């Protein structure tokens, strides 16, 4: 499931890969922008070629493919041997063993909303500013419609698909609406419990941890009370969080995005990574990167996994940071530039997924890579990677500020 579970916290498992694991890669026929999902020894990934691929998680061996009519850029959800994806205007339910369709339900344009599965219902963003809940037989249980999106102040609201991936916790569904508000709905009925305006992008999603909801917006990270929607704290920064979902572990929330300050009168190409105290909002450390970050970070075992965007003219970077200090553990340049005639490459949006010590990451050139999470071995040629000795300054990642709590 997207971000590791319905709470969307991005928490991973062990960083130690199983004995005998050999890094592998698999080539889809279109770019991969959604994040992979791993369940039951199978890696599932969607591609803009309209195909959901099922691969052996340890070897990369092809198992089956499921074809839709339009490109797929969301993350599958897997529950009770069924895979759920949104695409070509429908929510699809696919048998996880055979790849055969069980049913599909029309939802309209849902952009890149990734389904969440909890308590026998599948929740997903839908067309015309809606969030819908469908049961495991493919029957609509409820739908909720938000206000539309106004391009300019005072202009008529525009309807479009809800791109936010819903989060679930203790009987409540949370998401960012097209109108920039965070919504909390009763999971069983769709009844509104509260809404709070944050000015966020509906391409982003929320994470829930310990009764607090975390969500990024242009220039801000909000912490809201999950029960009431009241603001607990907000941090204003010179960073835009368009796509990235916060990662939360223990008492720290991590978020990454695009640096919003101008450089010599032109938009910055750099990105920022932050760590904040979940209770107080106090900044613990901050790191800047040489490229924007649109993928959400993942955290686990004291490590923060991060992929920068890169571009069609320059490399992206896959890196591991120390989650406590922000120090770089290792980095690998990832040159995904397409060959002539191939699909255009416009940057990494796929978020790292870690399962059983293996890190999975999709590239815009159509490759899904699987490498050892603790060292990144195998994702690119060895001569383009480097471990960073203790006490040395990172190269691709540049430290600009660090504050540690005592």
Image (spheres, rainbow, N blue to C red):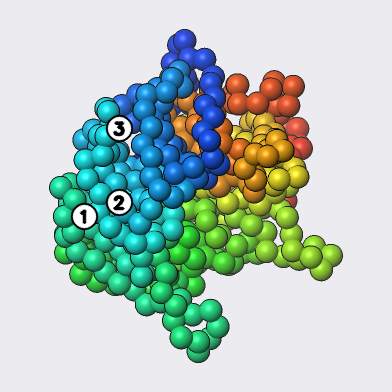
Question: What secondary structure is found at the residue carrying circle 2?
Answer: strand
Of residues 24 and 17, the one nearer the viewer is 24
Q: Residue at x 20, y 69 (%)?
A: 191
Residue 195, placed above or below residue 321: below
Q: Residue at x 50, y 87 (%)?
A: 155
106 on left or right of 196: left
Q: Does label 3 or label 2 sit earlier along the sequence? A: 2
Q: Are marks 1 and 2 in contact (CB under 8 Å)?
A: yes
Between circles 1 and 3, the one closer to the viewer is 3
- Between 93 and 190, the one lying in front of the other is 93
Disc 3 element: loop
Badge 2, how many Cα within 10 Å: few under 14, some, many 20+?
many
| Furthest residue toward top | 20
CA–CA distance between discs 3 and 2?
A: 15 Å
Image coords of residue 61 (percent x, y): 43, 20
Lower sequence index among marks 1 and 2: 2
Residue closest to the eye, 365 or 220: 365
Q: CA distance from mark 1 to mark 3?
A: 20 Å
Q: Position of residue 158 (x, y in %)?
A: 44, 77
Disc marking residue 134: 1
Instruction: Indicate which disc residue 99 carries.
Output: 3
Q: Which residue is mark 2?
A: 91
Q: Nearer the viewer, residue 63 or 16?
A: 63
């Amino acid at each position: 499931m997207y971000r590791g579970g319905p709470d969307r916290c991005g928490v991973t498992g062990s960083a130690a890969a199983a004995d005998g694991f050999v890094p592998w890669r698999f080539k889809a026929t279109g770019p991969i922008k959604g994040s992979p999902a791993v369940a039951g020894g199978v890696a599932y990934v969607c591609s803009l070629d309209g195909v959901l691929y099922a691969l052996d998680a340890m070897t990369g061996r092809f198992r089956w493919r499921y074809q839709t009519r339009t490109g797929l850029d969301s993350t599958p959800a897997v529950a009770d041997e069924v895979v759920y994806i949104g695409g070509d205007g429908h929510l699809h339910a696919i048998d996880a063993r055979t790849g055969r369709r069980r049913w599909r339900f029309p939802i309209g344009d849902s952009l890149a909303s990734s389904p969440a599965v909890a308590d026998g219902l599948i929740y997903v963003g839908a067309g015309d500013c809606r969030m819908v809940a469908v049961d495991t037989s493919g029957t609509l249980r409820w739908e909720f419609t938000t206000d539309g999106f106004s391009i300019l102040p005072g202009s008529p609201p525009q309807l479009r698909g809800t791109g936010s991936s819903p989060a679930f916790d203790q009987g409540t569904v949370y998401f960012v609406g097209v109108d920039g508000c965070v919504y909390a709905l009763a999971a069983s009925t769709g009844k509104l419990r509260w809404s709070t305006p944050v000015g966020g992008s509906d391409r982003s999603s929320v994470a829930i941890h310990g009764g607090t909801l975390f969500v990024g917006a242009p220039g801000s990270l909000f912490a809201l009370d999950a029960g009431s929607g009241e603001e607990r704290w907000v941090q204003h920064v010179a960073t835009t969080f368009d796509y990235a979902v916060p990662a939360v572990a223990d008492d720290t929330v991590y978020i990454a995005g695009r640096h919003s300050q101008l450089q010599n009168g032109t938009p910055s190409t750099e990105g920022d990574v932050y760590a904040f105290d979940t209770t107080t909002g106090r900044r613990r450390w901050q790191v800047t990167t040489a490229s924007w970050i649109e993928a959400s970070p993942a955290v686990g075992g004291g490590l923060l996994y991060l992929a920068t965007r890169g571009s069609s003219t320059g490399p992206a970077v896959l890196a591991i940071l120390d989650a406590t200090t922000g120090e770089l553990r290792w980095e690998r340049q990832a040159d995904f530039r397409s060959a002539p005639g191939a699909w255009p490459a416009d940057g990494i949006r796929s978020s790292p997924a870690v399962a059983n010590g293996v890190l999975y990451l999709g590239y815009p050139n159509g490759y899904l890579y699987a490498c050892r999470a603790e060292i990144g071995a195998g994702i690119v040629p060895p001569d383009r990677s480097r471990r960073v000795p203790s006490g040395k300054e990172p190269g691709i990642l540049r430290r600009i500020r660090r504050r540690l709590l005592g």
